[in-house]
Amino acid sequence: MQRKIAKTILTLYPLFPVLVYFSVLTGRPPVWVSLIIAFIPMATHYWSTHRLITRTSFDIPILIFLCGTVLGFIVAPDKNIAAGALYSTIASTLVYYGITANSKASRKYWLWTGGIICLITLLLSLWFLSHSTHRVLSFNQWAFNLFSGLPKTSGPVLQLNTIGALLAVVIPPLFAVAFFKNRVSLRIIALILCLFFTTMLFLSDSGAGWLAVAVSLVFIVICWRKWLIWVLAPVGGLLASAAVLFYDKTQWLRISFSTASLMSRLKLWQNTIPLLSGKASVTGLGLGSWFKVYSSNYTGYVPVIVHNSYLQLYCDTGIFGLIAMVLAAIIFIRLSIHLLKLSPRNSVNWIGIGLIGSIIAGAVFAMFDVTTSVTYVTNNGYIYLVLPLLWIGAALLSVVSGKLASTSS
């Protein structure tokens, strides 16, 4: 009986930390209650295996990042805001180890996991279309009108780049599953979802999302047939030339790829660099503190994020976060090279290629916006959360790499 209960808890491990996010956002239940519940699966894992975690390739970067998170909390001027980031970082870490703890689970488990991710993406996409009024243009106005009748919710509204980032990292694995050898039924389902989410991405008018998913899909296509690089290169050049030629004559191009928006981001980045001097060059500005520090040094309109994930990470966690990011990037490259060298014998290989494409898409998107965290503005200030998006991708890549290593040995 105890074994069955333990197995059930470990199966649901990735869902336990989600309660922490509700506590940070709504205050219910109390955070200490959510944290105790979130750590139950880790205790169960230790009882079952005599290890707190399932060891993975990213353990050292995660440990260094957690050190940076603690340091960022210590130096943060507003501990309430920093606490939200600290708790959600712990939750994201537990989501990562919840996924990797089930690395030996059956194929059915991973189909359910993928299905849940797709369902969440679908619901968030519909929520975006029913609530958002951002960039209603000639090609997407009908979609906003179609879903405008859905029930509205109070609270924050998804921004176009928020849904764009999510779709950009979900589409590549689906594309890989649909594109490469697999069960016919699974390929058809993946193709339908891929086409639907690609349409949603187009309707969102997230220029950064378009660019990110295009880069990732080019990578996947070249993995499928290397010779296609000689086709994609000139086609890409022609499309880029056409975009430049018709840029001033096409309203939606000027809006979707606004030079003014890019210049405003460059100004934000340039103004942020001087703030990271002295002690801040080591410690960063503190968890979730960029907005307050920037506002106190510069006048005029200040966005709630710095619009660059790498710079935001440095501001939050200082030199520790930077070191963790570099180490994680090196490990990711090594895992990717190893995976790409393997002969594509089964669907696991293609899912791995899709996950690499997903992380590439996230890395491209991260240059123009913050995908590692989110800032919710409230009447009393703002709430700063660390998102588990990157952690989920890294965990799935670790699982796929482990499965491929076991089958090739």
Image (cartoon, grey):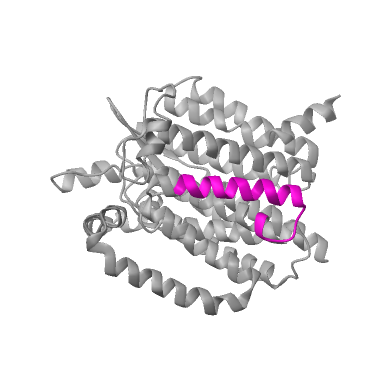
Image quarter where the N terminus lies is top right
Whether residue 64 is visible, yes or no, is yes
Q: What stretch is highlighted in magenta?
A: 178-201
Is 183 one of the magenta-colored residues?
Answer: yes
Residue 173 coordinates in the image, percent (x, y): 61, 54
Q: How many marks?
A: 0
Across and down, in percent, residue 274 comes to 22, 59
The residue under the point 72% across, 44% down is 110
Residue 384 appears in view: no
43 over 251 or under it: above or below: above
Q: Is residue 95 left or right of residue 109?
A: left
Q: Nearer the viewer, residue 70 or 353?
A: 353
Residue 222: image quadrant is: bottom right
Q: Which secondary structure dominates the residues rendered in magenta?
A: helix
Q: Outermost residue toward the left?
A: 299
Counting from the top left corner in percent of width and height, residue 247 is at 26, 63
Quadrant occupied by the C terminus: bottom right
User: Vertically, is 3 above or below 163?
Assistant: above
